Amino acid sequence: MKRGLLIAVAAAVCVTGAYFSFSKWAIRHETVELYDAARDRVIDVDVAIRRDAEVRSMAGLTTLPVAVVNHGNTVKNTEYSFLANVLAMRGYLVLSVQHDLMTDAPLVTKVGQLYVGRLPVYERGVENILFTVNEMKKRFTNADYSKLMMVGHSNGGDISMFFAKEHPEMIKRVVTLDNLRVPFLTEAKFKILSFRSKDPNFVPDPGVVPDDDECARTGIEVIKTGAQHTDMSDRGPEAVKEKIQNTLDQFLSEDSDLRPTRTDVLKISGDKVSTGTAISGGAPAADRAQHSAALLPSQR
């Protein structure tokens, strides 16, 4: 891990709550239903955007960077607002894509096959993302779809990494939360940040996560959260989400052009947005509440 990120994380845990400089206008969320006629498939997208950034974009004063959020297995695309809000706060147009439908076959593990039998799922995810991006170009015309921030949890993290492998020219950064199957791209020209759980029921396949030496060589950031795998969505405890939010915000702040321009203070908690004042003091004790896994080992 880079020294700057370590210092920033250490400073962040000295603040109670996830507080960030932000516009007094909140973040707008909208659900958009898309239809891919070629595949006869409905794709729901949760759009999150800073209201002031949207106004400036509509006026042609700024071009929005774009982030795509990919959900985990059995978790909905709307259950990552704690991530979407941080991204929107930094000026991103955030597209949280619903990859799974009730009619889709469940995830399976087939030992010996590429990516343990999940290649069709990753390929479908890539098609979903490409279709979503092309449709959003018609709705948000002043946004940069050529260099995406790809974010994903668990199976969504694997979709994110697979998309980056297939379309590296479209990627600016990749952020994963406990992806388990698709190996990190160690020779990539874009930045990678990954949050890892401490969960014996969710162990990455061999060769997925680079060792410390390889991370140091390539600049990949790996954050050991100590959390449970299933805590890395809106369902998780506040302490876990706040730790991820603080680190993600620092990761985004390295792009100076994305720094918030207002000085109002906003507290981000799940899908709720409220103003508040940062308070110095000890960090809240991490809530390591055990969440029972709803999946069989072969489905994770």
Image (cartoon, rainbow, N blue to C red):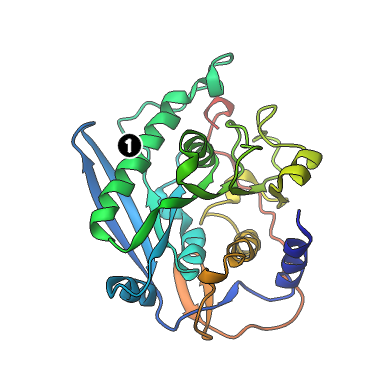
Per the image, the residue denoted by label 1 is 101
Q: Is residue 194 above or below residue 5?
A: above
Under mark 1, the amino acid is Leu
Name the element at disc 1: loop
Instruction: Give the number of marks.
Output: 1
Give the x, y percent position of residue 92.
44, 63
- Most foreground residue, 184 or 11: 184
Give the x, y percent position of residue 21.
55, 79
Residue 72 in view (yes/no): no
- Give me the residue at 69% from left, 47% from top: 220
Image quadrant holding the C terminus, namely: top right
- Most foreground residue, 158 or 56: 56
Name the residue at the right extreme.
213
- Give me the residue at 54% from left, 76% from top: 267
Residue 162 in view (yes/no): yes
- Give me the residue at 51% from left, 61% from top: 82
Name the residue at the top extreme.
112
Name the residue at the left extreme.
37
Left or right for 73, reference 199: left
Q: Is residue 16 above or below residue 63?
A: below
Give the x, y percent position of residue 204.
66, 33
Q: Is residue 145 above or below residue 74?
A: below
Give the x, y percent position of residue 292.
59, 42
- Most foreground residue, 141 or 229: 141
